[in-house]
Image: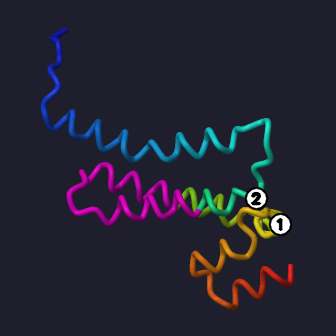
């Protein structure tokens, strides 16, 4: 079997993959914390990942394989995100670091904020 030599383009793709996956590692580490509660950070962390995925998809100089993977990832992540329940919303509001300010600061809109307040 012949030894494969990685090209500069191969390394570029590897770097793009690492950049794309780094926020997922960070979120996983945060959500895996066993010495502190993490439910209140569920919505903000999901939102940060969705934003990261959308930024990746909208990059003009990203490899097509990374863009395609990001599209698939977005579909899967939004499927899980839609399964979160009111407990996540309530926990975010009750967290003194976040409260309703999180939703206002992230442009959730008055109707959605009103719905959260009614939960």
Seen at 62% across and 38% down, the residue is 29
Sequence-wise first label, 1 or 2: 2
The residue at the far front in this view is 96
Q: Is residue 31 left or right of residue 7?
A: right
Whole-percent x, y for residue 57 in the image: 35, 62
Marker disc for residue 86: none
What's drawn in magenta, residue-wise? 47-74
Tags 1 and 2 touching, CB below 8 Å: yes
The residue at the far bottom in this view is 111
The crowding category of the residue bearing disc 2, from other C-alpha atoms within 10 Å (few below 14, some 14 to 19, many at least 20), is many
102 falls in the magenta region: no
Describe the element under mark 1 as helix, strand or loop.
Answer: helix
Q: In this view, does 15 lie to the left or right of 116?
A: left
Seen at 29% across and 36% down, the residue is 14
The residue at the far top in this view is 1
Q: Quadrant of residue 34?
A: top right
C-alpha span from label 1 to label 2: 8 Å
Marker disc for residue 94: 1
Quadrant where the image shows the C terminus: bottom right
Q: Which of 22 and 4 is in front in this view?
A: 22
Prevailing secondary structure of the magenta residues? helix
Q: In this view, does 108 lie to the left or right of 61?
A: right
Seen at 36% across and 58% down, the residue is 56
Seen at 76% across and 65% down, the residue is 92
Whole-percent x, y for residue 83 in the image: 72, 63
Camera-nearest label, 1 or 2: 1
Whole-percent x, y for residue 118 in the image: 86, 84
Give the labeled residue for mark 2: 40
Q: Quadrant of residue 93?
A: bottom right
Q: In which quarter of the image is residue 26?
A: top right
Rendered view: 9 above or below 115: above
């Amino acid at each position: 079997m012949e030894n494969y030599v990685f090209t500069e383009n191969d390394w570029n793709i590897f770097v793009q993959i690492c950049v794309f996956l780094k926020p997922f590692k960070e979120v996983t580490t945060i959500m895996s914390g066993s010495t502190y509660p993490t439910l209140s950070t569920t919505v903000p962390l999901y939102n940060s990942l969705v934003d990261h995925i959308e930024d990746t998809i909208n990059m003009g100089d990203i490899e097509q394989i990374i863009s395609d993977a990001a599209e698939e990832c977005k579909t899967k992540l939004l499927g899980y995100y839609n399964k979160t329940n009111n407990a996540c919303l309530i926990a975010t509001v009750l967290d003194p670091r976040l409260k309703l300010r999180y939703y206002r600061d992230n442009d959730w809109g008055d109707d959605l904020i009103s719905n959260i307040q009614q939960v």
